[in-house]
Image: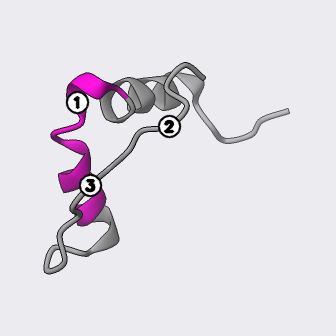
Amino acid sequence: MKTGINPCVDYAFKIVFGSVEYTTILPSFLQAVLGTMEDPLMELQLLNLSA
């Protein structure tokens, strides 16, 4: 059964945006996707890093 989700892409996304090493780019990415450039994100907390 096809789900339409490519696990390779999801894995890469988690590595880039779900790693402590890359937390400096995550706020910019989220603000661009959410369209909240006028109201910047002040703090992010990554939960469940081992899953």
In this view, the residue in front, 6 or 33, is 33
In this view, the residue in front, 6 or 42, is 42
Magenta span: 19-32
**Residue beneath the point at 42% across and 39% down:** 46
Residue 19: name its quadrant.
top left
Is 11 positioned to the left or the right of 20 in the image?
A: right
Tag 1's secondary structure?
A: helix
User: Which amino acid, mark 1?
Assistant: Tyr
Residue bearing mark 3: 43
Tag 3's secondary structure?
A: loop
In this view, the residue in front, 3 or 24, is 24
Magenta residues, dominant SS class:
helix
**Residue beneath the point at 26% across and 55% down:** 43
> What is the basis of the colouring in this image?
one colour
Query: Which is more foreground, mark 3 or mark 1?
Result: 3
Check the image and report above or below for 14 versus 45.
Answer: above
Residue bearing mark 1: 22
In this view, the residue in front, 36 or 9, is 36
User: Which amino acid, mark 2?
Assistant: Leu
Residue bearing mark 2: 47
